[in-house]
Image (tube, coloured by chain):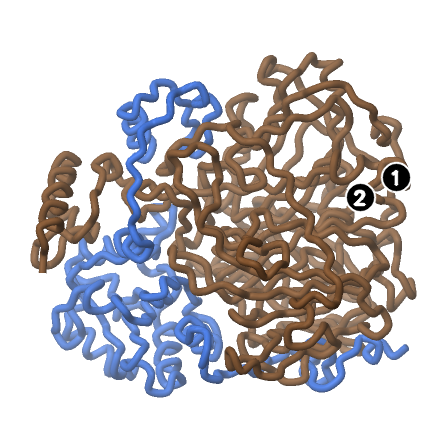
Chain colours: A brown, B blue
Amino acid sequence: MANLRDILNAQKNRQELIKAKLNRRDLFKMGLLTSAGYLVRKNGLSAWAFDGGCNPGICRLGCSPPIQPFLDPLPIIPVLPQRPLTDPGLQFGAPPQKCPNNATNPATGLPFEGRGQFNGVLRSGTDCFQFFDQYPPQQFFVERARQNTNFRITSDATIPPQTIWGWNLGGSDPSDVAQFPNPTIVVRYQTPWVVRRFNELSPATDGFGVNELSSHLHNFHSAPESDGGPCRWFFKGQYFDYYWTAQQAGFASDFPPNGDIRESLSSLWYHDHRIDHTAENTYKGLEGFLNIFNQFDTGDEGTGFHLPSFPQFDINVILNDKLIDPGTGKVCFDTFGFDGLVGDVQLANGKVQPFLNVNQRRYRFRVLDGGPSRFYQLFLTNPANLNQQIPFWVIANDGNLLTHPVQVTSFRIGVAERYDIIIDFKQIAQTFGATTLNLENRLQQTNGRAPTNNILPAGQGTTCVQFRLGAVVADGSVDPATNPTFYQLPPTPTPRITRFFKFERDNGQWAINGQFADCGVIRFTVEQNTGEDWHIINSSGGWQHPIHIHLEEFQIRNRNGAAPPAVEVSRKDVIRLQFNEDDLVTMRFRDFVGDYPTHCHNTIHEDHAMLLLWQVQPNVIDNNQNP
Amino acid sequence: MAKMTRRKWLASAGITSVALGFGGSLVADDIKNQSTPERHFQDIPARELIRMGHLPNVELITQTGKKVRFYDDLVKDKMVVINFMYTHCEKVCPPIMMNLARVQKMLNGRVGKDIFFYSITLKPEQDTPQELKKYAKEIGVGKGWYLLTGKPEDIEFLRKKLGFTYADPAEDADKSNHIGMLRLGNEPFMRWSACQGQARVEWIATMIQNETDLPYGRPAHPTTVKVYGPGAAAATLGGGVKGTSTGATANAK
């Protein structure tokens, strides 16, 4: 029964709707009119929002409210603290152990630990940690997935606080809230570690996100049970122990016992990988970095390769683009789209177009495209002189140090790729007179399918981070201009077999070789300790796909027969599959056995269903070239 | 369209100089010196937003001639599987409809109880309720599976709202090559996803149940992992193997 307030509200709404010139039929279609002809109950609708299609519930490019850039400093991401084994989180149920703790937790009726579940169902006795006895864990972390309903993407107070999901700093106290970006995990090679993750999330109440989690460490050399693949999710009330040997690839095959130093990784990230729901869960905030150091890439510019010291001069930056619902001012996600989602609100480390005060010296930035779908071409723009071509250095691709730094004036990055760059602010200030530099995305992209490949003029793109240059300070880091040598590339293997993977669309559904993602099918078997060549093929001129292969880093032999550009002469784990390309990559499959995915990392394509599972096994010869 | 809208709004909000770039796709840097626009945000529940954005309450007619409202009668408070088809479709629909028929059986009596299937015709002019009824009989449509027709403009509107569209207008107009997705929706929990109509039936059934059963008390569903090729016959080690699964053993030190 309508009360007076409802009637007044309905009258007010009606006035607003009349102003917006909507007819009865429009209202009905928008769901604002019931079949009996009454306006549905709403507490104040605003006429402007109905103008021309940017209605509440419409999550679309061009409908987000504009937000002023450069209001907030770039957040420096907190480092996840180590915890002693005596920490209550690590003692809950049972301390981390080789085989999962699948005893039933009487409080939930579910196994304490979610490891051992596959596709949501327990497979008792499975997913014990490989190599756990040989490389016992020496370092422990805890993270808890939580909801934070008071997350601000901007200090513009007219934009309401947002709801995010994220991992916290590991404490059980409610004050230890979800972080975005999630805490950076900092580890060292040869120090095996465990991260115990608790799923404390209730079902989403804000329209997207599925509280069933799988956390992939992209792209460490991980066993399947710790890889956080798409089919190994766990539920609210469960924990999941992830364990890593912290050895370079080859540690149990051609380079025992510590692996091939040339396979060292440095900039990784972890993100949710729940099949069919990866896009919404990562979009909602389940993304963070992991930096791994070793005796060369030390985090101290006084030692090793003399790369800028972490964390003062070595800064992780994750880029994301968002859409905001024009009716609510809240970040929205279109769970009904298949093509991909590009936003018109640009974030870096969770803030709208932040600034960073820097000193005049060299900095290392670990730049990650956190998705869900956008490709970037990043330039340094001096807003005081748009004609300048400002150089900087790429030192690593997908977290893998190149043999030598490569000087560039821009780089292209797709979802999940990482580019480590060095910017010498002192030299740029001296050469170009710049006091402000914008890290500007000049690649035009107007839908989730692909960029147009148009490069916009300087100053007309989107600034992701604005650097404000300060004083000249001491710099003990290596000058990339001296052409220092990092790791040599490992030799490419002689392939045992060449396989072909066509990434295609089949009646609006994303497919690989005509088949769809399926947690119940392992499509082919790779023989352990062999190398293979894979053709990654896109015969479309309308789509691009960043393709990710788990387990090992590959090298690009060629792109459409041509040598890859200098920044891609590297180990990689994502290849941007561009229009009408046949890209040939090569890799080894070492150390671990079990199942892994290959998939498109445009997370909307991945969820619909451009993903396949394969496995590594010893002594299995599978010669299917088109699996 | 979006560009005009945004411009108009910005103008009304007192912003005069905004470089919108391409269709509003780019974030303008030069709004920084403008005054903050007046905001009119409302606290609208997400379930309402999804309904407003994607689940119009259009009138449809079932294969038995019953008039129903899409949101009120078919979707609200339910777990649903929605696809588009037409009775004379020769390419995309037959395998999908046959898959759905098999999935219906695999779901073991749940369709009609807590899961509902809706197959909406793309050719309402031809597919009368009588035609749909005949077709339903041919493919073995059981309880809780409705074949739906309605006014062409309503169906077109619904198709777009549910996301069964191609960006390219020519492609979008070609009904013989329509989107083969199944839209999965758990309306009260706001879980909306999609499944491929031509996927393996076991996987379709699993996906539907994964969206339904939240999260406790999820009944066992097919979990067998098939390995294609010679890997199936060989002893497989690693992640999924029972008992010990040490890489050391696998690597025969």
Q: Residues within 10 Å of mark 1 (few under 14, many from 20)?
A: some
- Quadrant in which residue A16 is drawn: top left
Query: What is the spatial separation of the Cα atoms under label 1 and label 2, in whole angstroms?
Result: 11 Å
- Residue behind mark 2: A401
Locate the N terminus of chain A and report the quarter of the image it occupies: bottom left
Residue A513 location, x and y as percent?
Answer: 57, 64
- Residue behind mark 1: A305
Q: Secondary structure at mark 2?
A: strand
Query: Residue B16 bears which disc, if any?
Result: none
Tell me the amino acid under the disc marked 1. Phe
**Closest to the observer: A182 or B25?**
A182
Tell me the amino acid under the disc marked 2. Leu
Residue at 59% x, 52% y: name it: A287
CB atoms at circles 1 and 2 under 8 Å apart? yes
Residue A495 shows up from this direction: no
Residue at 58% x, 31% y: name it: A73
Q: Decide if residue B68 is on the left or right side of residue B40.
A: left
Q: Residues within 10 Å of mark 2 (few under 14, many from 20)?
A: many
- Quadrant in which residue A392 is drawn: top right
The mark tally for this picture is: 2
In this view, the mark in front (1 or 2): 1
Residue B61 location, x and y as percent?
Answer: 15, 68
Q: Decide if residue B44 is on the left or right side of residue B229.
A: left
Residue A127 shows up from this direction: yes
Residue A326 location, x and y as percent?
Answer: 33, 40
Letter of the chain that mark 2 sits on in the rendering: A
